[in-house]
Image (cartoon, rainbow, N blue to C red):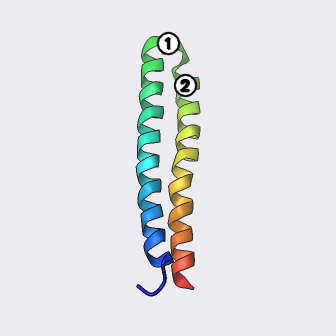
Amino acid sequence: MDNPIQLALPLALGLAAIGSGLGLGRAIGGAMEAMGRQPEAIGRIQTAMIIGAAFIEALTIYVFVSMFLFLGN
């Protein structure tokens, strides 16, 4: 490995994946708890949960794409 970025990018992807997994777990767990408390609001809670999960997952996707862009140079 002659370039330090070749080590840093996969580590960043791993950290992003761990953070994304923890964030998704907390978000979905909280949404499930809220749905159990207020069954009449399941539709609104589920919509907000899906939008939030998409934003959380976007971090990992951005790091994944940037890893391939930087390693390609």
Crowding at label 1, few (<14), some or many (≥20) Cα neighbours within 10 Å?
Answer: few
Quarter that holds the N terminus: bottom left
- Coordinates of residue 29 in the picture (x, y in percent): 41, 29
Q: Considering only vertical position in the picture, is 1 above or below 23?
A: below
- Coordinates of residue 9 in the picture (x, y in percent): 48, 70
Q: Considering only vertical position in the picture, is 36 above or below 54?
A: above
Please tell me in which quadrant of the rendered image residue 11 appears.
bottom left
Residue under pointer 2: 45
- Coordinates of residue 63 in the picture (x, y in percent): 53, 62
Crowding at label 2, few (<14), some or many (≥20) Cα neighbours within 10 Å?
Answer: some
> Of the residues shown, which amino acid type is indicated by label 2?
Ile
Quarter that holds the C terminus: bottom right
Residue under pointer 1: 38
Q: Considering only vertical position in the picture, is 25 above or below 5?
A: above
> Of the residues shown, which amino acid type is indicated by label 1?
Gln
The answer for how far apart the CA atoms under marks 2 and 1 are is 9 Å
> Which residue appears at 57% of the width and 61% of the height?
62
Mark 1 falls on what kind of element? loop
- Which of 71 and 3 lies nearest the eye of the viewer? 3
> Which residue appears at 45% of the width and 12% of the height?
37
> Which residue appears at 53% of the width and 83% of the height?
72
> Which residue appears at 47% of the width and 55% of the height?
16
